Image (tube, helix red, strand yellow):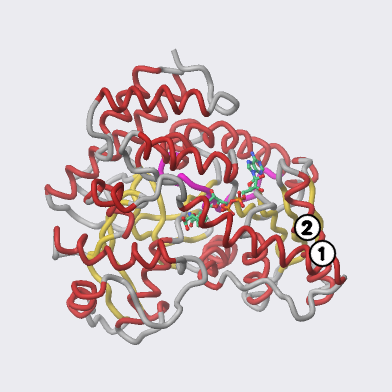
Amino acid sequence: MKKFSVVIAGGGSTYTPGIVMMLLDNLDRFPIKTLKLYDNDAERQNELGEALDILLKEKEPSIEFSYTTDPEEAFTGMDFCFAHIRVGKYEMREQDEKIPLKHGVIGQETCGPGGIAYGMRSIGPMIEMIDLMEKYAPDCWMLNYSNPAAIIAEACRVLRPDARVLNICDMPVGTLRRMSQIVDKEPKDLEVRYFGLNHFGWWTSVKDKDGHEYLPQIRDYVAENGYLTQIEVDTQHMDPSWQETHKKAKDLLAVDPRFLPNTYLKYYFYPDYEVRQADANYTRANEVMDGREKSVFSTARDIIERGTAEGSNFSIGSHATFIVDLARAIAFNTHERMLMIVENNGAIANFDDNAMVEVPCIIGSDGPEVLSQGNIPEFERALMYQQVTVEKLAVEAYIEGSYQKFWQALTLSKTVPSAEVAKNLLDDLIEANQKYWPQFN
Ligand code: NAD
Ligand code: LMR
């Protein structure tokens, strides 16, 4: 089997060790020749790079491993770029969450004003990275799971429509794992139908390979427990705030019991409740900094100090095997069925062709082919149209440097109560993002 060369962009990410462990776990399916880390923060990446170098020399010395901040070195000769960058890092995530809360509005990484703010920071660097990839590795595919995925995907559609970039999210994968546990199946046994936008969608069918429909059974469970399951199902969505989120799916289902909701809909259906529940002084950014970030970097330091990874391995990002499934689909034309963020082009029959939607696709060596999901009901269609217009306005605002469109995007967001609040929020966000955003006039 061919051996592949992979660069992980955002090498200093808290997810990097989990992804590397996952790659090691999947070498029989996806052999690796070269593995590189690329980041623009040398110090952050060096700690993980040094620790992973020790670990890889012990576990799989045949892999050529290196880490760099030089894009030419990073991309040359690569087949795949796994991209998980966070522009502005946790320091700015904290602002994205805390500034809206000060105005009584949802403070979240990808939903509402925080997501738009993060999007405005991310569009430029993502496009720059795509250009660097095309310059140094014209045949390379970027599998992007950097957030905010909806806005990045829309920016790619508009600014780099022909680039080899595939946008994908792990949330539906994580929730499907929970569903599979509810019905006592393996996730791979289940095939879904789904429609929506990123972090804004619904499952309309969950069947096994024999065609048995599990949606009613899952619905009964979710109506009582949300997606909360007893056994640890994923390594990522386990913190207390996530347990609350899985539980809240129960109230999302109640709004339209026909379909199984994506958990992120809670920010749009219950914003007042979510704001009341939030601690404006201690948000998800703080939870991650005190939890995942501390634990990943202290494991790295421990490995470096002891000079060995024996006895202190990083945990495997097991849910992240979807990234290998996607890379394999491209590399071996496997026709894997996966949810992807793609241009609609008729997949949802009664929705705009040029909207970036999240739907099941068949992935082969030319990329995704969308699977038709038919017509969707007016309730969901109207919600999606409002949200996709927010995302489109945000990207237009970025390209044109338009304060007006930025204000409109915030005003239109279902999470923001009025144009007045939107304007006050925007002015605070501009102040906080001076280092990252273009000028808005
Ligand atoms: P993190 O802050 O730990 O790591 C991000 C890294 O990106 C940092 O080391 C930073 O220096 C680097 N970076 C920032 N801008 C860069 C640039 N222009 N070029 C190269 N490197 C750059 O963040 P994290 O919590 O590990 O998350 C990483 C990303 O993955 C986030 O965008 C997060 O939202 C996303 N994520 C997505 C999914 C998904 O499935 N869609 C799941 C989990 C995490
Ligand atoms: C993260 O892992 O930080 C985010 O992508 C999602 C979350 O857990 O808040």
Q: Nearer the viewer, residue 327 or 17?
A: 17
Tell me where residue 415 appears, x and y as whole percent.
27, 40
On-image quarter of the N terminus: bottom right
Quarter of the view holding residue 34: bottom right
Quarter of the view holding residue 386: top left
Q: Is residue 332 above or below residue 69?
A: below
Asked if the residue under mark 1 is in contact with the one under mark 2, i.e. CB atoms within 8 Å, the reply is yes
The residue most toward the bottom is 184
- Residue located at (27% from left, 70% from top): 226
Dot 2 corresponds to which residue?
49
Assign a secondary structure to mark 2: helix
Q: Which residues are magenta?
A: 137-151
Query: 10 Å neighbourhood of mark 1: few (<14), some, or many (≥20)?
Result: many
Left/right placement of residue 281 relative to residue 289 reads left
Q: Nearer the viewer, residue 339 or 113?
A: 113
Quarter of the view holding residue 266: bottom left
- Residue located at (57% from left, 28% from top): 436
- Residue located at (66% from left, 63% from top): 296
Tell me where residue 75 appears, x and y as whole percent.
73, 46
Q: Amino acid at mark 1?
A: Asp
Tell me where residue 219 appears, x and y as whole percent.
20, 73
Query: 10 Å neighbourhood of mark 2: few (<14), some, or many (≥20)?
Result: many
Dot 1 corresponds to which residue?
53
